[in-house]
Image (tube, helix red, strand yellow):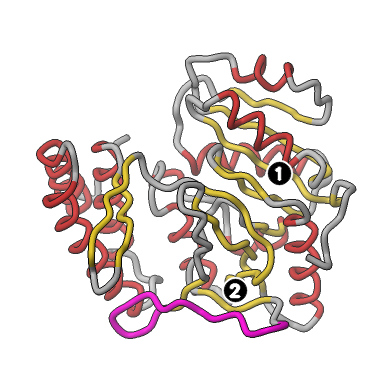
Amino acid sequence: MNESSMSPVAEVMAVVVTYQPDSARLGALLNAVTPQAEYIVVVDNGSAQDVASVVAALGSATVHVISLGKNLGIAAAHNAGIAWARTQGAKYVLLMDQDSEPDPGMVAALKAAHEDLVAAGNRVAAIGPRSRDRRTGHLAPHVRFAGMRFAPVACEPGQRVVKTDLLISSGSLISLATLDAVGEMDEQLFIDQVDTEWVLRARAKGYWAWGHCAAAMAHSLGEWRRRVWLGRWREIPLHKPFRYYFMIRNSVLLQRRDYPCCAWRRLDTIRVLQMAVFVMMLHPQRLLALGKMLQGLRDGIRMRNSR
């Protein structure tokens, strides 16, 4: 990657959110991001283990730890990290999950592309890397809404960035100026669809998400995988049952808001129906997971934001 750098990228605060993290994997993430970002803050959502001790054992004086004391959700943790970034003079935040690991040079590549997009007159919501599945090595494409499906966006030879309709929060680089204009993360959603909601809200305000064609990170998705034939072999990620409550509830809550575009509404409905089928067919705890989905549907209809 031509834009790789061996020194920390100035003005970037990496916000790493943890909840019951694997110590070895958290250490690998921090070792990967420390050479790349000028500032790092770990925001812990009430883990049983002492995350501050894990961080201290790495011997890095540049990592600050914020303990929320209890699990307030991914959105609240992101917002706590963003608030800390404002006090430290950062101009960008790099949101990172505990199960992700940036490739060398990723942060420098994202920031350089972000600056060039803004200089060219673009209103940039966020820019993110491609995600490489830790288990299979598959490098996921960026996607756009297209008819009845999420269509992969091909990066042509030499192409640096592409417009995308969705970005996962992990790996996303966002300027604080954009957060001032769009607003921070919606804490009512707690965990799932937080990134989707923010990108849709930004899009409604005239800001586009961008995907970098060369920057990449390792990422894990789901607690289980099932391999199925759907015209080709695909691995379907399956989650712990409680996650399906938030997935369904938050989809219903977003469907009831006025700013998501029609294309997202259509595709999210299809996605939820497919999810229900996969849970019924493949989930090792299908009855419990289906019960959580029904509970989420009920609470979404009732506009309940319980955690």
Identify the residue under disc 2.
207
- In the image, residue 176 lies at what x, y percent? 71, 56
Q: Which span of residues is magenta-colored?
A: 145-158
Which of labels 1 and 2 is toward the front?
1
Q: Amino acid at mark 1?
A: Ala
- In the image, residue 85 lies at what x, y percent? 74, 42
Location of residue 108 with respect to 241 vertically, above or below: below
Asked which quadrant contains residue 236, the reply is bottom left
Instruction: Please tell me which residue is depicted at 61% across the width and 78% down the height of the picture.
Output: 162
Identify the residue under disc 1.
14
Q: Is residue 155 magenta?
A: yes
Query: Does dot 2 land on a helix, a strand or a loop?
Result: loop
Q: Is residue 2 left or right of residue 274?
A: right
Q: Is residue 149 left or right of residue 119?
A: left
Query: Does dot 1 land on a helix, a strand or a loop?
Result: strand
Label 1 – label 2 distance at C-alpha: 22 Å
Location of residue 219 with respect to 140 vertically, above or below: above
Instruction: Please tell me which residue is depicted at 75% across the width and 22% down the height of the picture.
Output: 58
Q: Is residue 68 left or right of residue 66?
A: left
Q: Nearer the viewer, residue 127 or 219?
A: 219
Q: Quadrant of the N terminus?
A: bottom right
Instruction: Please tell me which residue is depicted at 60% across the width and 20% down the height of the picture.
Output: 51
Assess disc 2: are there few (<14), some (14-19) or many (≥20) residues with their C-alpha within 10 Å of its C-alpha.
Answer: some
Q: Is residue 266 magenta?
A: no
- In the image, residue 237 lies at what x, y percent? 33, 50
- In the image, residue 202 lies at what x, y percent? 54, 68
